[in-house]
Amino acid sequence: MQSLSTIWATRGDWFTSDGREQSIKDYIFLTNQLVWKRQASFLVAAILAAFYFDPISIFASYFVVILTEGLDELLGRKSKAWDGRDPVVGRQILKRIALNTAVSAVTISVFIINIAVQQASVGHFTPLFFLFSASVFAAIYNSQIMGILILRLSIYGFAFLFIALLDVFRYRPPLSSHIWLEFFTIIFVLYFISDISLKFYLGYQERREQMKLIKEEIEHTKAALEVKSRFLATVSHELRTPLTSIIGSLELINNDKLGLLHPGLKPLISIATRNGKRLAVLIEDLLDMQKLEAGEVAFHFKPINANNLVSEAIESTSGYANKLGIHVTTEPCEEDCQITGDHNRLIQVMVNLLSNALKFSYEGGAVKVRVENLCGRIRISVHDKGLGIPNGAKDCVFGKFSQVDSSDVRKVGGTGLGLNITKQIVERHNATIDYVSELGVGSTFYIEFDRLTNGSRPGANFEPLAKSA
């Protein structure tokens, strides 16, 4: 059993506006959700009792029970318009709940007592079982408001005592009679119902407190993410402008545009320029990631020929491929390969996939790009014969700031954001991205789109996943 201070603490929270609103809404929601389940049980009880007792009185009392359900239905409609801010309306709803509870509990008790009164034999197992079921039902599903629960169970308690004392007053048995055994058993049942009612009430309060803490944590997380996004955006923007100037100045110096440079300084200037460009790529990736997560990237969906998309992406990376001595080949699709997408963003996706394939390939190797029509799906795959990816590394491959080889002596560098950004862009196109790989043999990254048919409208299959910047 919980201490009285614990019970009072949980009840004290109910008197706050948020606690009262949530308890009332939860109570009415469950009441309306379970109305047919509750009525079905009473209908079965009425039909069963009508076979053995006076059917007219049984169904008359059951009909009154049905009428009381209409009161809860009307109250449910009124409570939907309550936003929880007006305490006057809240008190009115609470009074209506108390009135409906009293009327409902009384009519149910009368219905069950009617059965008990008509039962002439000693013992009232059937009506007591019906009343016990109603009490347990109330303990489980009406535990949101302690006062209402006590009101309903108090009325049921009087019905229990009336039925328990019915045979005592009828037969005035000695204390050794089974009638008194039934009476004391009913007293024990009342204690049992009170105990489980309290436990369900405290359990509801505990769950509501946990939900409150979860909501607070969610709000704190959202606030922290907002601060992080603003910080990234501000820092990235502030870094990009001076960094562009620095890189431009270094290139001018290195190309002898400002006068001849001492040969010994050129390697240092080249290193500084190269690292500046790497930092610029990191900043651009950070900005892209922040905008994608914030939904601030505008996507303009138009028909795109997948073959042309691949050709343009290969041309964009040709300089990098030539520098590494890697030959890039294509296998275009001979059938119709129209897709719907944002041209610039899909070029970014293809450039990321091609750059990854190139930098993880061996010098003098080859990369193959294939476009296929697979049963109404357009697949673009990029295959390399490079290092390969170990099993179980998918989270790392598509994660943020992560690379499969994260050691200090890894073969290639990078921000660890490229494939994460690629995956987000692909998913905004309702497309999929995945890969197959084997260590030492190579990897194949592929993306799949719905094929755009003649009867399709560009962008018809896309939900507004991103808002305009």
Image: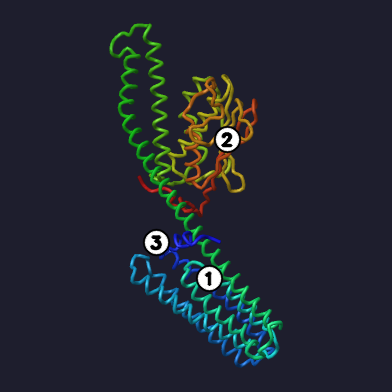
Instruction: Assess disc 2: are there few (<14), some (14-19) or many (≥20) residues with their C-alpha within 10 Å of its C-alpha.
Output: some
Q: Nearer the viewer, mark 1 or mark 3?
A: 3
Which one is earlier in the sequence, the residue at label 2 or at label 1? 1
The amino acid sitting under disc 1 is Gln
* Farthest-out residue, left: 258
Q: Are marks 1 and 3 in contact (CB under 8 Å)?
A: no
Q: Which residue is mark 1?
A: 33
- Along the line of sight, which residue is nearer the eye, 41 or 442? 41
Q: Which mark is residue 54?
A: none
Residue 66 in percent (x, y) is at: 54, 83
Residue 197 in percent (x, y) is at: 55, 68
The amino acid sitting under disc 2 is Phe
Q: Is residue 126 above or below residue 140?
A: below
Instruction: Assess disc 3: are there few (<14), some (14-19) or many (≥20) residues with their C-alpha within 10 Å of its C-alpha.
Output: few
Mark 2, secondary structure of its residue: strand
Q: Which residue is mark 3?
A: 18
Q: Which residue is mark 2?
A: 445
Residue 459 in percent (x, y) is at: 45, 51
Tell me which corner region of the image, top left, top right, bottom left or bottom right, holds residue 21.
bottom left
The amino acid sitting under disc 3 is Asp
